[in-house]
Amino acid sequence: MKPKGDTTVKSIPEKKGILHEWEMEDQNIMNEKAEQDVLLIADNETNRTALKNIFQDSYQIEEAENGVQCLQKLQEQKNHICALILNVNMPGMDGMRVMETLNAQGVPVQIPVFLMVRGKNESIIKQGYQLGAMDVITKPLLPYVVQRRVDSAVELYRSRYEMRCLIESQERQLIAKELEITEANKGTIEALATAIEIRSGESGQHVRRISDITRYLLTYTFLGEGMEPDTVEQIAIAAILHDIGKISIPDTILNKPDKLTPKEYAIMKTHTIHGAEILGRVPQLRNQKIFRYAYDIAKHHHERWDGNGYPDGLKGNEVAIWTQIVAVADVYDALVSKRVYKEAYDYETALQMIVEGQCGVFNPELIRCFLDSEKELRGFYE
């Protein structure tokens, strides 16, 4: 049974090129999500029947008799499912083991999961929330309470998803259109990067300072020795796009004021890979000289000299010198600037943290050049 009300997603006007492909992909997922299936997982048919009676007038119902079936159905129909109601006590793969698997796959970030337990088992409830459960439903069931909780969560997740799609669609339009029209024009790239920064609660000056610091070090130190001025400028422009992959990071993680959990940090780290992928999906950019630098910087600006960076664990000069420069500039600017999760450090403290390796280990020669130039670099913050 279809959900009540008009949930049809309006079609996207016909467009050509990669932007159209992106939007059609979003369109297909949105249409699938509009079907709003609730997946009920319980070995006891009585429990499933009780839940069906609550939801059958509002949602389509999918059922699973055990944890294995649940994971199979979720894999097959993930874009159709708007909520999971998971019984904890089941033979074989019980609800908590299923929850651990769902958590490892990042499912609770995308779909609200409700645990169904008998009585108030505090340890189970606590563990469920730690694994990402949206809420815990206790038996015996109160239909109107269960219905309200699930409806509210489904609406919340759907609104978040639609907003994220809208924001990402707009940002992708900027990427595709502006890069095609201007062929990596600096002003357009700056505007794009600023829009991404604003989404993460920053002023938009971060990317300009990274570009300016990179240009300065390549121009006024031996780090840029042998580089043509045009090459230095291309690298400085490419540095603006170092965090383009943050488009793919959920707002709840990107703007979280507290320390990220290990799982959230793992998601945050994917912005390097996504950034390179986004740049690689723009054919017009691949034909430009800037692409080589932009791709490398976006993917590897979190690598470190000792190999303890990400995503590839590159070591020493396996990382290009221009990317190493952007990495130091990015750390320096993050330290001396106020962020949603921290206050700004003073310049001396920031330098000490960099030199002591508190933000990762950097090329010693690069650090020496940076320290020699740092007083001049402060001028970019006035």
Image (tube, rainbow, N blue to C red):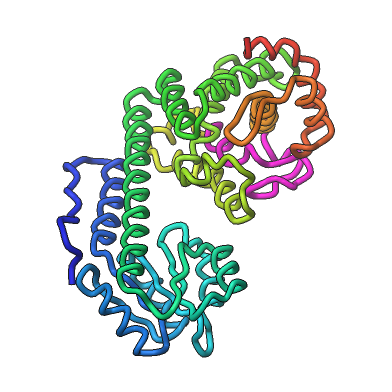
- The residue lying at 34 percent from left, 89 percent from top is 46
Q: Where does the image place residue 41, in percent across and percent down from the top left?
A: 40, 80
Quadrant the N terminus occupies = bottom left
The answer to whether residue 183 of the structure is visible from this angle is: yes
Query: Residue 27 or 265: which is nearer the viewer?
Result: 265
- The residue lying at 63 percent from left, 48 percent from top is 311
The answer to whether residue 139 is above or below residue 223 is below
Quadrant the C terminus occupies = top right
Magenta residues (range): 293-321
Q: Does 253 lie within the magenta span? A: no
- The residue lying at 49 percent from left, 40 percent from top is 245
The answer to whether residue 71 of the structure is visible from this angle is: no
Q: Where does the image place residue 6, in percent across and percent down from the top left?
A: 15, 56
The answer to whether residue 5 is above or below residue 203 is below
Q: Does 310 lie within the magenta span? A: yes
Residue 353, by quadrant, is: top right
**Left or right, 235 with reference to 86:** right
Query: Residue 223 or 328: which is nearer the viewer?
Result: 328
Q: Where does the image place residue 53, in percent across and percent down from the top left?
A: 25, 79
**Left or right, 28 with reference to 372:** left
The answer to whether residue 366 is above or below residue 222 is below
